[in-house]
Amino acid sequence: MIKTDARYIELIRVLQIEELYLERDPFGSAAKLRGWDPDEVIELTRALKEAGAIRRFGAALTPRNSGFKSNAMVVWEAGKMAEDAGGVMAKHPRISHCYIRPSFEGFPYDLYTMIHADDPGHLESIIKELSMLTGLSSWRALNSLIEFKKTSPVYFPLTHSLDGEK
Amino acid sequence: MHTYEKLPEPRLDETDRKILNRIQGDFPISRDPFGEVGKEAGVAGDEALRRVLALIDRGIIRKVGPFFDAKKLDYASTLCAMEVPGERIYDAVKVINAFPQVTHNYLRKGKPNVWFTLIAESRESIDAIIAEITDKCGAPVKNLPALKVFKIKVDLKLDDKD
């Protein structure tokens, strides 16, 4: 639906302008930029959300600055237990991301979780709790030491032609 | 992270918390979103907007807007891991960060030590970027696409803890 409809692509480009949401009437302003009717912008944006193309519309917090002081990527060696363990972990309110990814030579971990805790002790206790709930006993907390980059992806950038070279 | 100044303890009052909990998951897609949010939090629309702007200034809100499902837009994404010796890390970071398709990049404890995420318009494009990074950095890149996604949820419930 989306890639075939130029209107959605135009809309997605406009909706990615972050400054829109710093004023009272974001969708009215988006409409003005495109010369569209505001109600149409709202209707199409809601349609994108309903179709799941917009996973979430809202504010993203910086966990560290909003009371979640201890955040870590914790990887688990799950193997055949990955399906069940992933299901259990996904239910935990302090886990924001949970995926199965391939393991590789020297790195047997295949279940990835992002855990947000109040402090290091709390993180430790969440990990122990998850270990008990899932039966997984081999894990590693890959704390981030330096953030080199954190940005939002840009979909359908204007520098690429869509019907382009391929 | 040590690249940031230490910020003062966040003090969120009841109204801030109500606003945050609402707009994290469900920013109203309407002609008057801040009016609606304010109404629920018991303040006027202008006050709701003022508070949101202040939360952005304080670094508590990183961004307001849509979060797209890359897959639904026919985009491909992956997580990559690399082991880069200490003295070459900053050169590698320069190469990696130059790609707009790289959205996150972290130095992490242990081996591998450099972890970055890629979102691009196709698998082929991801493979091409990885090949270029491998070539320019002289270190192999592990491509670790999600085989199964159990959860992606970035809104964190703020309870009345402080």
Image (cartoon, grey):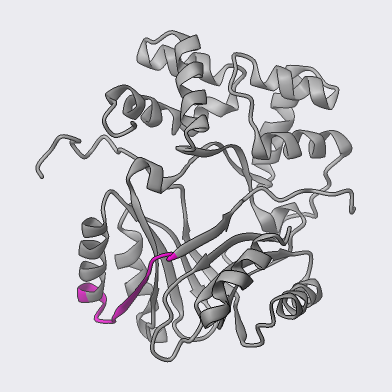
Q: Is residue B112 visible?
A: yes
Q: Is residue B1 visible?
A: no
Query: Which sits in the foreground, B89 or B18?
Result: B18
Q: Magenta segment range?
A: B135-147
What percent of the width, then of the height, locates residue A36? 39, 10
Query: Which sits in the foreground, B104 or B127?
Result: B127
> From what the image shows, is residue A132 above or below residue A115?
below
Q: Please give left or right for residue A147 compared with residue A70 in the image.
A: left
Q: Quadrant of the N terminus of chain A?
A: top left
Residue drawn at x 69%, y 82% is A135
Query: Which sits in the foreground, A57 or A120?
Result: A57
Q: Quadrant of residue A59?
A: top right
In the orientation shown, which residue stands out farthest toward the left?
A165
> From what the image shows, is residue B138 above or below residue A159?
below
Q: Quadrant of the C terminus of chain A?
A: top left
In reply to whether residue B144 is colored magenta, the answer given is yes
Q: Please give left or right for residue A153 compared with residue B35 in the image.
A: left
Q: Please give left or right for residue B12 compared with residue B36 in the image.
A: right
Q: How many marks?
A: 0
What percent of the width, then of the height, locates residue B129? 24, 63
Q: Quadrant of residue B43?
A: top right
Residue drawn at x 64%, y 15% is B32
What percent of the width, then of the height, locates residue B153? 61, 51
> From what the image shows, is residue B2 above or below residue B160?
below
Residue drawn at x 89%, y 53% is B161
Q: Please give left or right for residue B29 compared with residue A161 in the image.
A: right
Residue drawn at x 9%, y 42% is A165
What percent of the width, then of the height, locates residue A31? 44, 14
In reply to whether residue B138 is colored magenta, the answer given is yes
